[in-house]
Image (spheres, rainbow, N blue to C red):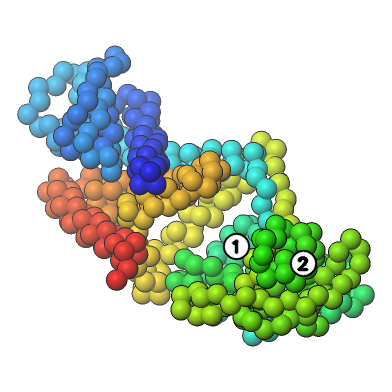
């Protein structure tokens, strides 16, 4: 069933993005009074066809759902047609260079508009998300060296206000490519690794610290790079849930609702710390200090020894509750649109920077992904909920828009390059050069597709 869900989520995403892109070309072509002969969803053999509209435009679905096109009346492709005077005026190459630029640019622009609409919808609806509050970082981490401690709330990055963990990740990901130190505004929490914070550090006034990103590389951005910096979600205290009958926890006398505050005199800030100590202590007696109904109790607990991948680890057989602090932030419509436009612009710039660093060798070409990876992410986000899926569609729409603007012949960006040269020289690119460039562009595109498929296979099916 997962494979079917993934296929459906992928096909739906591709259809939406392609249709919106091609509708951009179609709508502007109609506004410029250019005759559209065919609108195709997919490439290759036509499997469905109907004609609509005053020009009897052919609307088709083709066999290969990895692209689409709008076919306009174009003498370069239909030289032997006997055209009427009216059709000659509506032929694509007869239009002014500015109309041609508008028609070609409309596809990528439509993708950016779609991304803004989708992001705005997400920002208006909002979902509960973890706040940008950090767990105690490891002593060796960049975050600890910057002076961050448990309970610290990050409220701004380089002067830009943030509230959510996802916003923190987004802002740092953009800055990570520059490999620099960034200014972070922090409101200190109430504790540090060594105990209560000083009264000065508990002030609710933010102070600035500098976080070095020089140790990150492009590969880190594909994983949890925040954890590499020492930034992890702050979690609530380790509270016990359901206690399994006859398990180590029940035999020791632990009860549902107990909050573990210390083990062998060491403070336990959250469930992760509890689990870590228990796993490292199979058959080893531990002295738990728990808070039960307002009273502190000392309880001796001996985790049972179980095998995990051939290694003996400790286990209590008890549910541990520990959740991050959540916030459901919803933006008003105008604010959501503005925020969506900013997110779309920032994502586009980040994509361009990544491509540039690939060209100069600072970023590996392994970051080029193809339809298999996109399908995998489509399936994962669809299963996570519609908000995640809509956000995924927005990011892919931006990628499609940026990729189509690359100055590669056969793509929209290649055509815009031709027309830019025409604006500068005052005459169109000769047909012979145009045909040679198209063939070269097709070869480049095929090489990129082969590389993308190879990376997909290596990523999804590692040896």
Q: Nearer the viewer, residue 266 or 370?
A: 266
Q: Nearer the viewer, residue 113 or 4?
A: 4
**Figure check: 183 above or below 352:** below
Q: Would you call the spot at circle 2 few (<14 residues within 10 Å), some (14-19), or many (20 or more)? A: many
* Residue at position x 37%, y 39% in the image: 8
Q: Residue furthest left?
A: 80
Image position, residue 175 (x, y; %): 57, 67
**Figure check: 350 above or below 22:** below
Quick check: can you spot residue 157?
no
Image position, residue 116 (x, y; %): 53, 42
Q: Would you call the spot at circle 1 few (<14 residues within 10 Å), some (14-19), or many (20 or more)? A: some
* Residue at position x 46%, y 75% in the image: 309
* Residue at position x 51%, y 75% in the image: 307
* Residue at position x 82%, y 70% in the image: 290
Image position, residue 104 (x, y; %): 33, 40
Judge depth for marks 1 and 2 and give the one in front.
Answer: 2
Numbered disc 1: secondary structure: helix
- Residue 450: name its quadrant: bottom left
Q: CA distance from mark 1 to mark 2?
A: 38 Å
- Residue 262: name its quadrant: bottom right
**Figure check: 155 above or below 404:** below
Left or right: 424, with 165 as reference point:
left
Left or right: 111, with 421 as reference point:
right
**Figure check: 46 above or below 204:** above
Numbered disc 2: secondary structure: loop
Which residue is the site of mark 1?
Answer: 169
Quick check: can you spot residue 389?
yes
Q: Quadrant of the N terminus?
A: top left
Q: Residue furthest top?
A: 54
Which residue is the site of mark 2?
Answer: 254
Q: Earlier in the sequence, mark 1 or mark 2?
A: 1
């Amino acid at each position: 069933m997962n494979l079917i869900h993934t296929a459906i989520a992928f096909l739906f995403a591709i259809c939406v993005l392609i249709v919106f892109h091609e509708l951009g070309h179609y709508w502007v072509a109609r506004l410029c009074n250019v005759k559209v002969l065919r609108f195709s969803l997919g490439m290759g053999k036509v499997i469905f066809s109907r004609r609509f509209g005053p020009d009897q435009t052919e609307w088709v679905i083709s066999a290969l759902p990895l692209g689409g096109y709008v076919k306009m009346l174009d003498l370069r492709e239909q030289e032997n047609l006997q055209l009427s005077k009216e059709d000659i005026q509506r032929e694509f190459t007869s239009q002014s260079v500015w109309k041609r630029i508008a028609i070609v640019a409309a596809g990528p622009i439509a993708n950016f508009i779609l991304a803004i609409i989708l992001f705005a919808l997400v920002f208006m609806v909002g979902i509960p998300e973890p706040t940008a509050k950090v767990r105690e970082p490891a002593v060796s981490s960049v975050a600890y060296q910057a002076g961050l401690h448990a309970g610290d709330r990050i409220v701004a990055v380089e002067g830009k206000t943030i509230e959510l963990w996802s916003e923190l990740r987004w802002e740092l990901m953009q800055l990570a490519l520059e490999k620099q130190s960034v200014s972070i505004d922090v409101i200190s929490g109430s504790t540090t690794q060594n105990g209560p914070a000083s009264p000065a550090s508990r002030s609710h006034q933010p102070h600035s610290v500098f976080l070095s990103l020089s140790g990150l590389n492009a590969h880190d951005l594909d994983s949890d790079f925040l954890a590499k910096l020492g930034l992890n979600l702050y979690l609530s205290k380790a509270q016990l849930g359901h206690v399994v009958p006859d398990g180590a926890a029940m035999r020791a006398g632990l009860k549902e609702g107990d909050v573990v505050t210390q083990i062998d005199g060491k403070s336990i800030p959250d469930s992760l710390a509890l689990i870590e100590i228990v796993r490292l202590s199979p058959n080893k007696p531990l002295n738990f200090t728990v808070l039960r109904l307002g009273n502190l109790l000392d309880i001796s607990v001996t985790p049972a020894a179980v095998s995990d991948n051939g290694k003996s680890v400790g286990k209590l057989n008890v549910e541990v509750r520990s959740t991050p602090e959540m916030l459901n932030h919803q933006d008003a419509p105008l604010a959501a649109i503005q925020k969506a436009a900013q997110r779309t612009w920032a994502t586009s710039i980040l994509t361009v920077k990544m491509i540039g660093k690939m060209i100069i060798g600072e970023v590996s070409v392994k970051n080029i992904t193809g339809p298999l990876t996109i399908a995998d992410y489509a399936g994962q986000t669809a299963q996570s909920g519609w908000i995640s899926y809509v956000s995924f569609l927005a990011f892919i729409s931006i990628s499609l828009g940026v990729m189509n603007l690359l100055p590669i012949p056969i793509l929209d960006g290649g055509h815009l390059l031709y027309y830019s040269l025409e604006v500068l020289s005052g005459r169109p690119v000769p047909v012979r050069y145009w045909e040679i460039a198209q063939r070269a562009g097709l070869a480049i595109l095929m090489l990129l597709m082969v590389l993308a498929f190879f990376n997909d296979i290596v990523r999804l099916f590692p040896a």
